Image: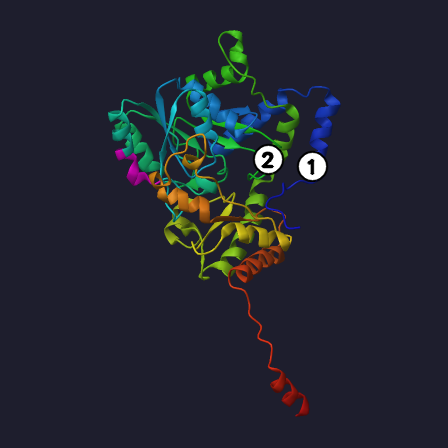
Amino acid sequence: MISLAKPFFDEKEKEAVSRVLDSGWIMQGKQVSDFETSIAKQCGSKYCIAVTSGTAALHICFMALGIRQGDGIIIPSFAWPSAANIAHLLGAKPIFVDSKTSDYNLNVDLLENIIQQSKSEGIRVKAILPVHQFGAPCDISKVLEIATNYNLKVIEDSACALGTKINGRQAGTFGLAGIFSFHPRKIITTGEGGAIITDSTEFAEKCRALRNHGNLKSAGLNYRMTDIQAAIGLVQLSKLKTILSKRKYIIETYSEILDGQDSITLPEYLSNSEHSENFEIAIQTLMVLLDKEIDRDNIISGMAESRIETNIGSPAAHQLPLFAIPSDTCPAATVLQKQGLALPLYAAMTKEEARKVAETLMDLITPKIYQEPQTAELETCLVE
């Protein structure tokens, strides 16, 4: 079975976990502190706060911003619904913005109208949450310009983007804070886990307090990472360059086979020279866009019959029952939800496996037709 994703583990992770177990100290301790220092150094940030998941990181960031009932947070619809769910839980309103079908990121050209409309409806818009979708950088400079004009905070959802750089700078370091996820499908993993990065001393202190029961001085949460997880993370981080290189090789294989194929559209950053010159992109999920005539769910079933795991790219959050906003509110996100197909991608994947995935996909989309020769023609051939 070719899985959708697999962690890149070897004996080093096992040895690191064994050392922690043997020490008798498994809760948040020195390993977590070392992991935070290493992530901050990797990203060029002053502070890192390790937590239990990317969703936990968002929860803490929103609370540190003071998000409350009646506030609004601008969120791309085509993104995993973690941020929208957290906003809802805090009594805030997720304000969905549409995406672009070219790179799956939020459409910055729509931001100002959405802010102005929301304010006219009496919503206290507090923040913008741009997502570097699947690791591809959004137009963060334009987001920051608009946020500054309207006095809004920017929290970057860089859950998938560890290793992605914009003009040499790590994604997640442009706004007030950025978050990462270390779920097993992400670039590196701690099993489950996440982190917040920021250059703000005040914001970092708030986040640390919220992670640990408010330090018993105010309301808080228990989102502490364990030393077991951090030990895995430290080994994984030491392999980051290798992991990115191996994943890039697989992506190039896919691109060579699928680029230009009928009924399949690749994200623009795989062939756009402007992207390649200005960005280093750590693609966490390779999603292709199928033509609307193709039943994506049938393709997923057909790939599974060939022992290949594929899946949707992401839901469009505005279409979830919790929010149930009309599909034409974010039409591009609706298309991406219905027609996006995530292909297997992981560091240990081979070129042969990637080729099998791509060729199986093409066969399902355009089945080969073998015409049986007519009986009379067959008999003639046999006589001759």
Q: Where is residue 23 in the image (x, y as percent from the top left)?
A: 73, 21
10 Å crowding of disc 1: few (<14), some (14-19), many (20+): few
Above or below for 259 versus 96: below
Q: What's the residue type where badge 2 is placed? A: Thr
Q: Which of marks 1 and 2 is in front?
A: 2
Q: Which residue is drawn at 43% across and 50% down?
A: 267
Above or below for 188 versus 369: above
Magenta-span inclusion, residue 112: yes
Q: Residue at x 60, y 76 (%)?
A: 372
Query: Which of the 4 image quarters holds residue 243?
Result: top right
Q: Main secondary structure of the magenta part?
A: helix
Q: Name the residue under label 1.
A: 12
Query: Which of the 4 image quarters holds residue 68?
Result: top left
Q: Where is residue 7 in the image (x, y as percent from the top left)?
A: 63, 40
Q: Name the residue under label 2.
A: 189
Which one is in front, 365 or 354? 365
| Range of residues picked out in magenta | 107-113
- Who comes first in sequence, dot 1 or dot 2? 1
Query: Which of the 4 image quarters holds residue 20?
Result: top right
Above or below for 76 versus 103: above
Q: Which residue is drawn at 60% across and 56% down?
A: 351
Above or below for 296 versus 91: below
